[in-house]
Image (tube, coloured by chain):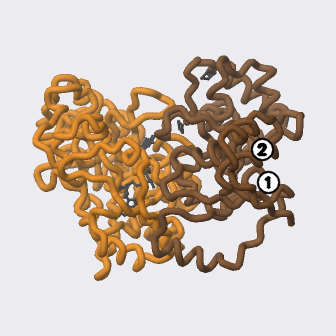
Amino acid sequence: MSEKEQEPREDENKEKQSRMNVSRRGFLKGVGTGAVSVALTGVPLVLPPDAADAAEALAAGVKESTVRLNVNGAAYRVKVKSHWTLLEVLRREMALTGSKKICDRGSCGACTVLMDGKPIYACSRLAIEMDGKTITTIEGLADGETPHPIQSAFMQNDGFQCGFCTSGFIMSTKGLLDKNPRPNSDEIKEALSGNICRCSAYRKILASAKAATQKG
Amino acid sequence: MKAFTYYKVNSVPKAVSLLAKYGEKAAILAGGSDLFGIMKDRPEGPKFKMPQRLIDIKGIKDLNYIKDRKGSLKIGAAATLSEIVSSDLIREKYPLLAHAAAQVGVPQIRNVGTLAGNLCQRPRCWYFRRSLFTDCLRKGGGTCYALDGENQYHAVIGGNGCCMVYPSDMAPALIALNARVEIATAKGTKMVPLEQFYVGPRTNLLRENILSPQEMVVTVEIPKPAAGNKGVYVKLKERDAFDFALVSVAVSLTRKGNMAVNPRVVFGGIAPVPLRSIRAEAVLNGKDLKVAIPEACKAAMDGAHPLKNNGYKVDAARGVLEQALGLLA
Ligand SMILES: Cc1cc2nc3c(=O)[nH]c(=O)nc-3n(C[C@H](O)[C@H](O)[C@H](O)COP(=O)(O)OP(=O)(O)OC[C@H]3O[C@@H](n4cnc5c(N)ncnc54)[C@H](O)[C@@H]3O)c2cc1C
Ligand code: FES
Ligand code: FES
C-alpha cells in the first residue's frame, strides 16, 4: 500500500499554481496544509495502531481529528476541524470541487454526493462524522477520459444550461440507478426531487436521467 | 459554522451523562439536517444560544433498529426515515407511518434524517430562524414578529403567545397511531404518550416539547393496531417536489362494516403542536364513515382563529381531512 504524506505548504502561490494543474494527483499534491494524505492505489487503508485511541478521544470530545475515509476509491486521511462540513473538506482540503456549494443549507442539492451509496447533502454533514465512510463524488464517475454513461446521457440530451446544478443531479441519478436500474418516470422524479435547477432545465434533466436508465 | 466540541458516543448512558454535565450548552446531533441549518444561521436571542458541544448519537447501536416486540413496533431514535420507508415490517403493518416518512423532505434528507430528530426538530417560523429577529418570543425576547408580519404559514389554532406551527410530518402520524416515546436521563428512563410530549406556547415558550436539556429520546413504540385498523396521511404542500406541510392530517381508525370506530385525527401545520381533533373524532366514532365526513370536517376547524394571511388554512385543513377520510371510506 502506498500511503503518501503530503509536503507541507511552501507558499500560497505555489499552491494556487498547482491547483491549476488538471491532473487529480497534481491537485492533491499542492493542496492543503499537509493535512491530506492519500493512498492513490485505492487499497483500503489499514487502520493505524492509534485507532482505539482515536475512538476514545472522540468519545471524550474533540475540536479536530483525523478522519479516514474512502473517496472515489482512494483511501484518505484528512485532518479536520469538528465544525467543517464534508463539502468544505471535499472542495477546500481535497480540491474535489465538482460538488458545488449554493445554498449551504440542505435545500438545493448542488452538493449531492453518495455516502455508502446513498445520496446525501455534503453541505449538511460534518467531515468528522465521515470516519470509515465511502464517498463518491462526481469526480469518481468517469473512467479516465471516458465519461460515465449518466454523464454522457446528460451531454447528449442537453440536461443543463449553466451546468452549476448538474453534478448534483448526476449524483442523485447515480444513487437511484445503482439500486434501481430500471426506474419509471415517477421514481426518477422522486429521486431528483431534492435537486433544484435555477435555469429550470428540468425537462431535459429528466430526459437525460431517463436516457441514462435505458443505457444501463 | 462556528467551532464546537464534537463527541462521538457509543452508548446512551454516555450520551445522557454528557447532557447531565453540559445541559443547554450541549445538543444531541443525529442527522443534523435540522440542527446544522440553525447553527449556520445563528438566529440567537436572549434565551436561545447555539450549542457549544454536539453529542453524535448515530454510532449508538442500541438506537439503530426497527423491530417487532410482541406485536408492538419499536423504533430506535436514530433509525433514519429512509430505513422506515423501506422497512417491510412497517410497510406491511403500519402503512400510515411509511406513508408519512416517505413525505418528509427528499431522499437526501431521509437518508440522514432520524426519527427522533424529526420529532425534536425546531420550528420553521422565518422570524425564529433568522438572526435579524433577536426579540422573537421563542428565543426569550418580547415580540411575536409573525403576529403583525408575514404569517401565511402560521397557526390558525392555539397560536396565542407564539403562532409558529410544529413542522414534523412524523408526529401527527405517530400520535394517530397512539405512539409513546421513551425518554432517557442520567437517572433512568420513562415512557410518555407522544401526544403529551408536545407543549404549546402557554406551557413553554422556549421549547416545543417536555424534554429538559438533560433528557433525550431513545425509542418510539407503537402499540399493535386493532384488527381492521386503517390509516392514511395527507399532506398539502405549496411546492410539489418538497416542502413542509401547509396543512396535513393523519387519520387512523378501525372499520366495522361501514362504521368508523376509535378514530384518531391529528393535524400538522395548523397549530404550535401536532393537534389532535377530539371534536372530529367524536363526530366520526361509531358512525357511518361516508355519511359523517362533512360534519367531521366542519367540526375539526371549530374555534379556528386565522391571522391576516392564513385564512386559507381553515379550508385547506378541512380539505385534507375530507380527502383522508374519503380514502378510508
Ligand atoms: C430541505 C429540507 C426539507 C425538509 N423537509 C421536511 C419535511 O418535509 N417534513 C419534516 O417533518 N421535516 C423536514 N425537514 C426537517 C428535518 O430535516 C427532518 O425533520 C429530519 O428528520 C430531522 O432529523 P435529523 O436526524 O437530521 O435531526 P437533527 O438535525 O440531528 O436534530 C434536530 C433536533 O432534534 C434534536 N435531537 C435529535 N435527536 C434527538 C434525540 N434522540 N433526543 C433528543 N433530541 C434530539 C437535536 O438536538 C436538534 O435540536 C426538512 C429539512 C430540510 C433541510
Ligand atoms: S449546497 Fe448543499 S443542498 Fe445546497
Ligand atoms: S443548469 Fe443552471 S442551475 Fe441547473
What is the number of callouts on the image?
A: 2
Query: Looking at mark 2, is its residue's CB closer than 8 Å to ligand 2?
Result: no
Residue at image point 57% right, 45% down: A88
Q: The orange chain is which one?
A: B
What color does chain A have in the rendering?
A: brown
The amino acid type found where label 2 is placed reads: Gly
Where residue B63 appears, as percent x and y from the top left, is 48, 70
Is B256 placed left or right of A135 in the picture? left
- Label 1 resides on the chain identified as A
Left or right position of B96 against A208: left
Instruction: Classify A34 as above or below B6.
Output: above
Name the residue beneath numbered marker 1.
A73
Mark 2 — residue? A140
| Other-residue count near label 2 (Cα within 10 Å), few / some / many at <14 / 14–19 / ≥20 | some
Q: In the displayed orientation, state which residue is furthest to the front.
A: A11
Could one spot residue B72 in this view of the protein? yes
Task: Quadrant for the N terminus of chain A, please.
Answer: bottom right
Callout 1: SS:
loop
